[in-house]
Amino acid sequence: MNTANGERRAIVDIDRVAKSFGDVQALRGVSAQIGEGEFFSLLGPSGCGKTTLLRLIAGFDEPDSGQIRIDGQPTAGVPANLRPTNMVFQSYAIFPHLNVAQNVAYGLRRLKLGREETRRRVDEALAMVDLAGYGERGSSALSGGQRQRVALARALVLRPKVLLLDEPLSALDKKLREQMQVELRRLQRAVGITFVLVTHDQDEALIMSDRIAVMFDGEIAQLASPETLYRRPVSRRVASFIGVMNFFDATVKGVSGGKVEIDIAGLGQVEIPQAQAPGGAAAGRRGRLASASARKC
Amino acid sequence: MSAGARAKGRWLRAYAVTYLIFLYAPVLLLPLFAFNNSAVVAFPLKGFTTRHFSVLWNTPVLHEAVFNSLYVGLSTAMLSTILGICAARASARFDFPGKKPIIGFIMLPLVLPEIIVAVALLVVLVQLGLKLSLWTVVLGHVLVCTPFSYAILNSAFLNLDRSLEEASLDLGETRLGTFFRVTLPLVAPGVIASLLIAFTISLDEFIIAFFLTGTEPTLPVYIWGQLRFVAKLPSVMALGFILLILSLALLFAAEFFRRRSERQTGGQGGFL
């Protein structure tokens, strides 16, 4: 499960990464590979370690053990300012003493592009997030949605190899959030940069991602495409976190020719393809069947 | 509200007003006698004059004292603000062993009787064989001003959203560059407020200056010396009036910058 999609090269390679804060084990040996150009989500309840993992990739913290490679390069000891990653913060972290254009140009100064080129790239980035002409606005005069766009433009203007997004939509109201979900996805397709999104919102992850890593208690419980995650959750916990599911207790009666015959209490005997049976199906085994098809929408 | 509670409210208000009059009436006497055309400080008033101010203008010793005070005040303001920035930044951002006692010792001079501090410093300086000069006064003033600088700057640093500094690092800026491009501009109003408060405190501090000053008196020490001569009293009143106006101006400026800092970093609560 932990390999990147066949056609994609791994841009972020997370190898048995563990991290503790005092007595709390935030990550317990997490491994995953994030493919180039992929929209990858870390999904889980609060405290599951998803933000910790994102901060390790960004370089704000160092793992206790294990390593993270970005584009083949080990990142141990490389500070955040030298990593080819940029982050959109949950609070957006727009510099209040700079206007919109100065915010977007902040990281460009180090590149010494010259006034004209800097200006051109800032305008380009602002146009990309539909904020063309907002350059001279003060950052305190922006709405929540606009702040988020500025944060996006500020990160994307540096053309990072990986864009990290820490719950970027959680501060927006429902309507704007749904609009931004579609727009983020469109933006990601347009720029072709790898996006790594941290979220606790199942719908958000399912709508936007190519692949999702569902995390509980500092471990990845399942790493799969939204479709697989939805149809074939590996455990009851993943299933109930992903959405509203119906659960049936069943006993396996027999296995034959790729089919599993199960007996569901109160419903009688049902045949299902073996590929859909959770875990290894063997006669006499009792298990639970999660039905995603009855999910409320 | 019942009639009893209203009556009680009226009494409390009367009490508050009386209290404030008692507190500020002496200060109001300053301009009254500063412009009073008489050689003695006493009622009835004798008419308007500015001659006490021209006496000040023609006293070179006074000018030296003013210069000494400015020198001490500016040095104190700079030093205690720099120390305050370091301490506030450390305590707002990091946890380290002994943090609470260290901060406690920084704040302690705030509640220590100044005369104790002054005598203790004098003993130590004499034991060390250091000559008393304006710099020994600066030393004492830094000790009493740093708690104020720390308190102002600490709230400025605490109000600063940590993710702003992380964002700067993330965008490729170094730690030092981040401090100058993000941290300092955002706490700048706090820095200015700290400079102004420390300067104001140093300017009118008497006890430490009196003990630690060498042959060059600061302004408060000079004024104290003048009080022995009754004839000089009206001009001291005039001087006091000028100092009052200056102090108020500085305090208002400090508060203005502190509030601006709060607006910029989105913090709450006040110092004054």
Image (tube, rainbow, N blue to C red):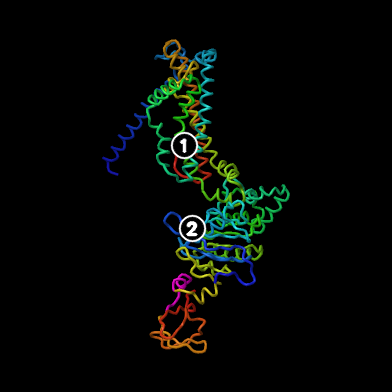
Eye-nearest disc, 1 or 2: 2
Pointer 1: what residue? Answer: B150
User: In the rendering, at what x and y percent does residue A273 appear?
Assistant: 51, 85
User: In the rendering, at what x and y percent does residue A21 appear?
Assistant: 45, 55
How crowded pointer 1 is (Cα within 10 Å; few <14, some 14-19, many 20+) is rated as many
Above or below residue A80? Residue A260 is below
User: Does the magenta run of residues contain A240?
Assistant: yes
Dot 1 and dot 2 within a common chain: no
* Amino acid type assigned to the residue bearing label 1 in the image: Tyr
Pointer 2: what residue? Answer: A19
* Amino acid type assigned to the residue bearing label 2 in the image: Lys
The chain under label 2 reads A
Residue extent of the magenta highlight: A236-247
User: Does the magenta run of residues contain A297?
Assistant: no
Give left or right: position of B19 versus B78: left
Above or below residue A162? Residue B42 is above
How crowded pointer 2 is (Cα within 10 Å; few <14, some 14-19, many 20+) is rated as many
Above or below residue A108? Residue A219 is below
User: In the rendering, at what x and y percent does residue B96 appear?
Assistant: 45, 44
User: In the rendering, at what x and y percent does residue B88 appear?
Assistant: 48, 40
Above or below residue A255? Residue A217 is above
